[in-house]
Amino acid sequence: MQQWRSDVAVHRVQVSVTNTAETPLRIIDLRLDSGSFEPAAPVRVDTTLPKTPRTDFPITYGRARCDDDTIPPVKPTDVVATMAVGDAPAKEVRFPIPVTDPLLTRLVKYECGEHILKRSATIAFGPFERRGDDLKGTLTVTSTRPVTIDDVDGTTHYVLEPEKRRPVAELAPGAAEIPVTIRPTRCDPHAFAEAKQAYLFQVWGHTEGGETYRMIVTPPKDVQERLLDYAIDVCDFPAT
């Protein structure tokens, strides 16, 4: 089980299937059954595999089951396949994923860490104005308890640069603004057309004495459109 960059935004993992025998293997559907995630419907693939070293099938997974204050341990998890070997009838087969699997551990930590951090702080994109080839503006942090913003990072398509880093800001409860600069990371029309994570900005933060967690901050649609218009202009490529 793996996850590519393009899978993150759509809550998806890749299940890699290998058939080392000469007998064809028919995979009808696949799903993830885990105590760490809400149930997700089986993904129908209906594919017959000959002897093959590896075939990847994308499947979605449910929202993580999180605690409010701590990262829960990874629960037992299976990849469940409805499958048939040769001419035999199809049946459900479970493939256990170890609770020590690094991908499972990372998915639980990232999603539940984000849940914990968002209980204490919300982040919004403030107004921006063009200055030369840069956009200057603010991130507005509204917190219910003291919060330290450890770092911020851009996306596959945009740099998000604060005035200082590590920490970016130490904030009292209430609302505060963090000055930032945005600029394109690259000027490639094809890359912008194929963007899957262009607006998934990352913020790391912690509360008093707590562990640092990451949250994904996605600007609203109108801000996304303004960022795209800005990139089209500063990169001087046609809007299509």
Image: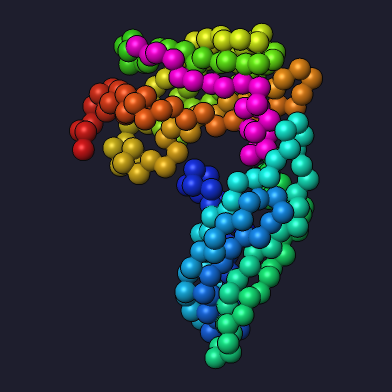
Residue 129 location (% of width, % of height): 34, 11
Residue at screen point 58% across, 53% down: 61
In-front residue for pair 215/187: 215
Q: Is residue 216 above or below residue 170?
A: below
Q: Position of residue 202 (x, y in %)?
A: 55, 29
Instruction: Identify the image quadrant of residue 85.
Output: bottom right
Q: Is residue 83 visible?
A: yes
In magenta, the rendered stretch is 110-129
Which is nearer the eye, 178 or 23?
178
Report the residue that reaches farthest toward the bottom: 87
What x and y, as percent, mark residue 144?
Answer: 66, 16
Q: Residue at position x 42%, y 35% from top?
A: 198
Residue depicted at 68% across the width and 70% down the height:
94
| Residue occupying image coordinates x 70% and y 13% | 146
Residue 227, magenta (yes or no) = no
The part of the image, by quadrant, that contains residue 131 is top left
Residue 231 in view, yes or no: no
Figure quadrant of the C terminus: top left
